[in-house]
Image: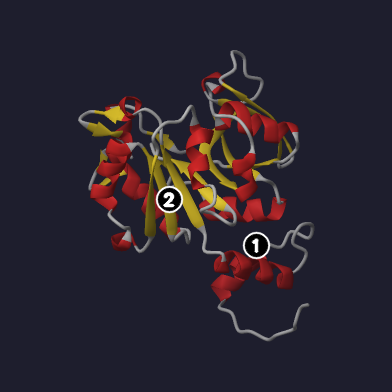
């Protein structure tokens, strides 16, 4: 049952609401407002994946997520970027020593106006195994980012809105690369990903996966240890994976040299 009400909304908020209307999935302003309110009530949450072997995340004397970037760190930049886009509840997944280093920086998140929950990974065979540690802790769509990237130029708000419109199980960020065979190569028709191949020898597309995506809770039920090798390819084959193509790119922090120019 629905009721008709009268409300007063600021111009900026109204423009944001109107941007959801596409005439297909969200047909009018009323439906957009309802969707907007539903998402706000559900308390948008994000997951930062820092799992895997600690040695693989080593950078200098510390780890990639805690590497210094000017007056900040990689993990702080991630938290601030997501907070700017309305994410106030966050989960960070990592093994003991990495998690300890991150906690020393972020604490409970109060300084950044967010609530941070820490989940220790004991073992995993891949990114999908790591992400499943939030199963039962998320009840609505959630954002996931990898913990060794700087992504302040990616429009997270547009990614989120597109996911809502497409009603897919997951929506992944895609960018272009001159070396697609070294990343997850993707084929797209419209906004749908029809094929996802991880590090193929000869890629037919220059569109590649950026490690940022929005997913529904049911995403965690798909089998496989790796997101890139198992889960995303299966969703693409089923027509349940959506794409958000970005003209901006993330910066991967794998070496000391990657910190320059951030």
Q: Residue furthest top?
A: 201
* Residue 111 in picture, x, y percent from top left: 28, 61
Q: Is residue 4 above or below residue 201?
A: below
Please tell me in which quadrant of the rendered image residue 63 appears: top left
Please tell me in which quadrant of the rendered image residue 224 appears: top right
Query: In which quadrant of the rendered image does the N terminus lie?
Result: bottom right
Residue 17, can we see it?
yes
Q: Is residue 219 above or below residue 53?
A: below
Q: Is residue 243 above or below residue 2?
A: above
In-image side of 151 versus 198 (left or right): left
User: Could you tell me how far apart the alpha carbons at marks 1 and 2 are, in whole angstroms?
Assistant: 28 Å
Name the mark on residue 19.
1
Which residue is located at x 39 percent, y 53 percent? 117
For this rendering, which residue is in front, 96 or 22?
A: 96
* Residue 26 in picture, x, y percent from top left: 74, 61
Q: Residue furthest bottom?
A: 6
* Residue 246 in picture, x, y percent from top left: 56, 42
Q: Is residue 6 above or below residue 247?
A: below
Task: State the SS at label 1.
Answer: loop
Q: Residue furthest left?
A: 61
Per the image, the residue denoted by label 2 is: 91
Residue 248, can we see it?
no
* Residue 252 in picture, x, y percent from top left: 40, 33
- Do the residues bearing badges 1 and 2 touch, measured as CB atoms within 8 Å? no
In-image side of 140 versus 77 (left or right): right
Which residue is located at x 64 percent, y 37 percent? 222
Please tell me in which quadrant of the rendered image residue 40 appears: bottom right
């Amino acid at each position: 049952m629905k009721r008709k009400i009268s409300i007063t909304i600021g111009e900026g908020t109204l423009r944001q609401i109107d941007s959801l209307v596409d005439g297909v999935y969200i047909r009018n302003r009323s439906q957009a407002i309802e969707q907007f309110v539903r998402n706000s009530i559900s308390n948008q949450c994000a997951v930062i994946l820092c799992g895997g072997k600690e040695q693989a995340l080593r950078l200098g004397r510390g780890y990639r997520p805690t590497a210094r970037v000017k007056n900040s760190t990689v993990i702080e930049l991630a938290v601030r970027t997501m907070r700017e886009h309305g994410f106030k509840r966050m989960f960070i997944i990592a093994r003991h020593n990495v998690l300890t280093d991150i906690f020393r920086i972020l604490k409970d998140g109060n300084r950044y106006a967010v609530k941070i929950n820490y989940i220790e990974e004991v073992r995993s065979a891949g990114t999908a195994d790591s992400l499943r540690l939030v199963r039962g802790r998320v009840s609505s769509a959630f954002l996931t980012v990898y913990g060794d990237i700087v992504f302040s130029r990616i429009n997270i708000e547009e990614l989120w809105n597109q996911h809502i419109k497409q009603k897919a199980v997951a929506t992944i960020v895609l960018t272009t690369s001159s070396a697609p065979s070294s990343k997850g190569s993707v084929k797209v028709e419209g906004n749908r990903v029809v094929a996802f191949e991880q590090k193929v020898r000869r890629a037919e597309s220059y569109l590649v996966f950026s490690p940022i995506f929005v997913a529904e809770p049911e995403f965690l039920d798909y089998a496989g240890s790796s997101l890139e090798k198992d889960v995303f390819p299966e969703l693409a084959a089923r027509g349940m994976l959506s794409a958000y193509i970005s003209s901006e790119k993330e910066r991967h922090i794998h070496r000391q040299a990657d910190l320059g120019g951030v």
